[in-house]
Amino acid sequence: MLGVTIIQGIGRSSSMIMKIKELHVVHKSKFQEIIIAEIEEFGLSLILDGYIQSTQADEFIYHESLVHPSMVLHPNPMKVLIIGGGEGAALREVLKHNTVNNAVMVDIDEDVVELSKKYLYPIHQGSFFDKRAKIVIEDGKKFIEEAESGSFDVIILDLTDPYSSDIAKQLYTTDFYRKIYSVLTDDGVMVTQAGSSFFYRDVYMDVYQAVKSVFNYVLEYQVWIPSFGYSCNFILGSKKYNPMMLKPEDIDTILKNRNVTTKFFNGYKYLSFIYGGIY
């Protein structure tokens, strides 16, 4: 594989070139191109339509940042829904919380899920096979539209970027967030990844305004993801709980009481999310 590279899209006219050490899978599903490869400096990686989704070297930064702020904000998250997240890493983080007795992961692309099960164990770490987990192969938008009101305490949207595909765009609209709101319990919390506010400021602001128009409390934060080549943005929406009221020591206590171990996320990291600013 000497000399083979992958071009990772960053912005509208910016890219990052990475050297591939070993290519495991190149597959075209009904929805997207799927590549699983060993990338120099980043290790085992999942790439969808030219966008890196997870690498073994730094996926924990992304997935811990996506999952745990919403999970610790809710005092007792028992029923959790993940839309997307086909490699199983968001599911892995959700299942760390001992309050969870039902975690549903919905992904539109069965091929991503099955290939991840086979090739990406170091990333999903067996989360697909946890007795509390249920994997549903379905369009996330359709699943939400048909779900009963008040079904979930926390909803996590682990999607491809809002500007990466037509499929993704549908899951970043005001109408979709209104439906998310109705599917949540009365004190429910949701979070979505929202791409890059630096390279796609206009798209990001549309997503932010859509969440803000629906939820009582909104927290926007960003985290540098080396393999993405940019700071990834996240937007949290809460019906009842103000994310600004959580103190670092409260978060650390919650994580300890729930037996959650992390490599990146903790109380003081959350504080940096709140006061770190957005480009």
Image (tube, grey):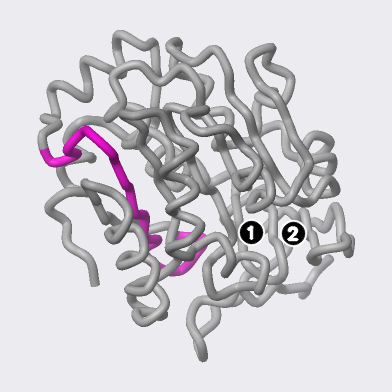
Residue placed farthest to the bottom in the image? Answer: 13
* Residue drawn at x 70%, y 72% as measured from the top left: 6
In which quadrant of the rendered view does residue 7 lie? Answer: bottom right
Tell me where residue 189 appears, x and y as whole percent.
36, 36
Residue at horizontal 58%, vertical 24%? Answer: 103
Element class at badge 1: loop
Can you give x and y, in whole percent of width and height, for residue 233 in the image? Answer: 36, 60
Left/right placement of residue 1 relative to residue 156 reads right
Left or right position of 218 against 131: left
Q: What's drawn in magenta, residue-wise? A: 226-244
Earlier along the polypeptide chain: callout 2 or callout 1? Answer: 2
- When the figure is inspected, residue 26 is found, relative to residue 274, above or below; the finding is below
Instruction: Name the residue nearer the viewer: 150 or 116.
Output: 150
Coordinates of residue 90 in the picture (x, y in percent):
54, 37
The three-letter amino acid code for the residue at tag 1 is Glu
The amino acid type, in three-letter code, at marker 2 is: Lys
Which residue does the numbered mark 2 point to in the structure image?
21
Label total for image: 2
For residue 179, side relative to residue 124 (left or right)? left
Q: Are circles 2 and 1 on residues that touch, CB within 8 Å?
A: yes
- Would you say residue 222 sits in the magenta stretch? no
Residue 242 within the magenta-colored segment of the rendering = yes
Q: Residue at x 31, y 26 (%)?
A: 74
Q: Is residue 187 above or below residue 159?
A: above
Classed neighbour count for the residue bearing mark 2: other residues with Cα under 10 Å, few (<14), some (14–19), many (≥20): some
